[in-house]
Image (tube, rainbow, N blue to C red):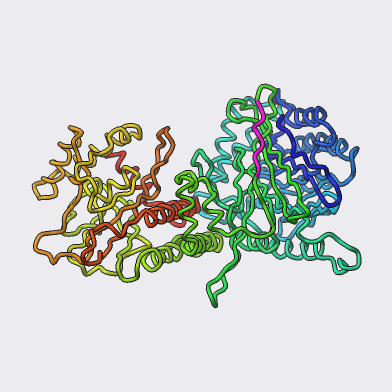
Amino acid sequence: MAAYPNIKTTAQNKVLIIHHVANIWNSEKHFYEQPLKEYREYLKNIPAQQRPQLILISGNVTLTGSKDELSNVYTELSIIKNMLDEIDDERKIVITPGLHDLEWRLSDKKDVLKAFKDQFSDFILPDLPDENGGVLKSLRPFAVSDRFGYFVFPVNTIQKPGALRQGSRPQKELLRQFQDAWKKIAAQSAAGGYSSGQVKEFMQTLQQFIWSETSYVDVREAENLQQTVAKELYPDDAADTGAPNFTNYYKILVTHHPILPFTVLSERSFSAAANSFGLLNELSSSEFQLLAHGYARGSSLLTQFPIAKVYNKDDNTGDTSTITQSSAGSLGSAGLASDYERSFNEIVATYNPESKGWSTYARRIFIRPNEKDTSLFQVAIHPAKKSVETVLLNKPEIASFFTEADMVVLQRHKDVLQNVGEAFTRAISDLHQQIGDVPSQALSAVGSIISSTIFQPGTTRVGLALKKPFSLMNRTRHISRSVCVIENTYIDPVDKLDPSYIHPFTYPDTLGAWSLILGKVIVFPLKDPNEVIDYQWLEQNNKIQVIEKALQYLSNGDDPAAFRARDLLEKFNHQTLKLSDTFLPPPENTVPSRYTSFISVPVPLRPTAAVPAIIPEMGILTIDVIDAPNIKPGSAFTEDRILLLKFISQVINMILQLGNAAKRPVGTWEEANNKLRNI
């Protein structure tokens, strides 16, 4: 077991140990595994001082929500709570319901959460909805400890079946399928047991059901949180009683669904619970440090994740804070031991009275004896808010693309980084307020930053071209057919009257398209006109066949574009294709363009890791430049500017991925990539 931070707990110097658990799926009557008993044994075998002050359970404590299963969980949790009480009485267990914990067999007019509330009333529970849209008030809707320095607030995010039934036809059909599957497994349970095959079918049906907008945050939760924080952490007599300062508390929100969208390393994306923006605003205002959720089944920790307060409409300013988001692993496996690595997250928060800030340590602990703990790692959290540009530079999605020397260069341009950070914050804000397409205003601002801050105003033409399926709307003087195109979206050049401007870009027979295909920055005029395409990269990323088929498709016909495509295809097949071959010159008999050089920056960039990684081809950031007289074309693209554009490319990638995960808008590049694969 990795060592704990070597800090002695005192009244001023606090150490808070948290176990974050989800997906217990308790049905030990029917399976060989007994998750809570195994977890209890783990607690017994560690020293008392290393046992948690808080156990956070982010839903799915049972498999089907039956009273027997709820009762079994209660019995085990009561034993665990008694173990904690033997140490002191300020150690708490906090529980929020998950989709598995509702009595789905009940009709819409019944209270599907009543059994859950009644069974676990001894623990810290969120307020829960009743059958009439009211609120089932919890006896203990939050927990606070001056001694340990925690404040924890659970929030329910589960929609009732009745609410879902009022939704779309696909929602209703999924609900019917799920309830049918529930009834089958419940009947088998009553008869004495059910097989792992039946459970697997049930879990697959549930997974489909989960993705049909099952999460929702009651608008009253934000006001409830605000009032509770004000009452508990800002007592009226604080000055007289010497109550701890507000910043002394480690503040935690517990939910089942995430309320911030995120993508895990496996590239699986999770959307936020609907209507969560008001709650996020309160988390930012009250400087919460930890957001603990379940739902995703896999264990992950997102550090310094930005959350934005509402923008001031008068001066377009906004405050940004960050939070650590813990996604609990699955303590149980529902009898499918090969499907999930059974684990929980252990979070250790330490308070430094000198800096008046908290530091957070975390690790994943596996229940199975033959599985090893992961090592501790530190995440710095401080009440003094970090700037969003600092947060972005430290994110793996960005930091992994730059060397230490690159970071030094980037940090010389704090004005640019700050402006891009504000644009990213705007995208997050629009996402949570559900304002149209997520990137529209944010990416428009990014275009202005490039044209007026990075480059001299009036000297550039900036576009963000996203990959899209070809349609008749894309027909121009230079495009008669194509599988897909790369078309300006969100950042669109103002100078559209230039007759030599070629747009949209066809794929894969243009230099801009090859910037995207290769995942590398391309500056024109090319430094080396004889540079050959990187075929090794294409082969490692399974792109050879896709490019070949796309060029074959363009080769059909007798027009000049088809002849050019056949020439490119022949060179491509002989592995002699050069980047210079893919440059599409302006149409003949047009006035020479004022723009004498350009740069194409792919979104996203090519990974720097030695091991190849399949990356999505989303789009390219293009900047055309009017070079000054007597200056070599391309000189405007200095090392500093290229680094800033690469930084912006990765921020754009994050914004587009967030919007795609929330289906606002759905990524057109996915449809284009599917079309390419199916030529």
Q: Is residue 128 left or right of residue 259?
A: right
Instruction: Tell me which segment is drawn in magenta.
Output: 372-378
Q: Quadrant of the N terminus?
A: top right
Magenta segment includes 377: yes
Furthest residue toward bottom: 314
Q: Is residue 240 left or right of residue 432?
A: right
Task: Locate residue 192, reporting x and y percent.
Answer: 72, 25
Q: What residue appears at the point 56 percent right and 40 percent down from the top-left corner?
A: 207
Task: Name the chief secondary structure element in magenta.
Answer: loop
| Vertical comparison of 399 with 389: above or below | above
Q: Is residue 432 visible?
A: yes
Q: Is residue 172 visible?
A: no
Q: What residue appears at the point 48 percent right and 43 percent down from the top-left corner?
A: 400
Task: Locate residue 643, reporting x and y percent.
Answer: 40, 53
Task: Locate residue 100, reporting x and y percent.
Answer: 66, 41
Q: What residue appears at the point 73 percent right and 42 percent down from the top-left corner?
A: 348
The one nearer the camera, 526 or 475, is 526
Q: Say how many tags the image has.
A: 0
| Vertical comparison of 343 with 625: above or below | above
| Vertical comparison of 459 with 257: above or below | below
Query: In which image quadrant can residue 319 be found?
Result: bottom right
Q: What residue appears at the point 55 percent right and 41 percent down from the top-left corner?
A: 177
Magenta segment includes 5: no
Task: Locate residue 146, reporting x and y percent.
Answer: 85, 54
Q: Is residue 499 left or right of residue 358?
A: left
Furthest residue toward front: 630
Q: Quadrant of the C terminus?
A: top left
Query: In which image quadrant can residue 673 be found?
Result: top left
